[in-house]
Amino acid sequence: MAVSKNRAFLKWAGGKYSLVEQINAHLPEAKKLIEPFVGAGSVFLNSDFPHYVLNDINPDLISLYNRLKNRPDELISDLRGFFSSQHNNEATYYALREEFNQTKDAHYRALLFVYLNRHGYNGLCRYSLKGRFNVPFGRYKKPYFPEREMYHFAEKSQRAKFTCLPFEKVFQYARKGSVIYCDPPYAPMSKTALFTSYSAKQFSLRCQHKLATLSQRAAFKRQIPVLVSNHDLPLTRQMYQGAQITSLNVKRSISQNGSSRKPVGELLALFHGEPVYPIAP
């Protein structure tokens, strides 16, 4: 499948821009690509399926995508003013972050979501258990206004349906003729490394096991191929029984200390056709 590299308009910790060639090489052909954890959408933007179902549990993200799909000119025009030197300071950032946490206006929340994403620390998207966005100010000299990338996203999103559902529901609604790509919150490298506050609801180890089970059932009982990204750990290899495993090395980008962003093991697990070996009951 030919790939044209297109960057997402959102900064995204753990985004898949650097891996789109490898991911595309492992995605079987299909009429529809389904992503239960779409994030910034790098795989969507760098693949070429006739149709897409793009899901995320974060309602702010999906609301933004729907507004950009349906009203791109208005959204981009209104957003431009937030990318000025007057808005790029700590006091303004925290004032606007508080407005984001208070407002119910969908259009204003969409504008502030992009502003906070581009001005906040390291592309993180993080909420407290009470559902309050809490990423600190990023201190960038001149945050980039992604106008071109937003228009490209809006154009391609005419092929997409955006949903905000639990990942279990997305699997339930999938039909034969589709392929599913999953980029879930990764399994922790250690007991202290569990990063689960992307949304107010945590993605637990129970969720990791549930995703693996649903992937097995979709592929081996319903003939819907599933490709999953995750850390390459004994835990994930055990969970992804029957899948074709490909190991990758990826430079981490979340570590606060740049010198510690070393390559770590990741994997792609493809559930497709028959299990590569019998699955334990």
Image: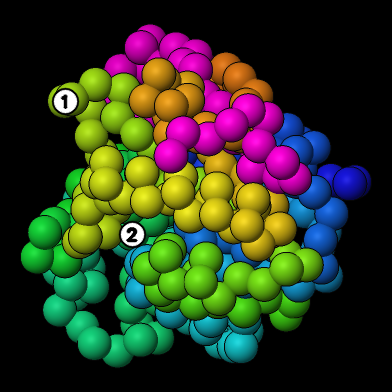
For the point 36% across and 12% down, the residue is 260
The residue pinned by badge 1 equals 192
- Give the Cα distance between marks 2 and 1: 27 Å
Q: Amino acid at mark 2?
A: Leu
Which span is picked out in magenta?
254-281
Numbered tag placed on residue 89 in the rendering:
none
Counting residues from the start of the chain, the first of labels 2 and 1 encountered is 2
Q: Amino acid at mark 1?
A: Thr
Q: Residue 93 occupies which quadrant of the picture?
A: bottom left
Front residue (pair 46, 8):
46
Badge 2 marks a residue whose secondary structure is: helix
Q: Residue 69 occupies which quadrant of the picture?
A: bottom right
Q: Please identify the residue farthest to the right as the structure is shown.
A: 2
For the point 59% across and 31% down, the residue is 278
Does residue 48 appear in the picture of this structure? yes
Q: Is residue 105 above or below residue 262?
A: below
Q: Is residue 268 above or below residue 156?
A: above
The residue pinned by badge 2 equals 116
Q: Please identify the residue farthest to the front as the structure is shown.
A: 281
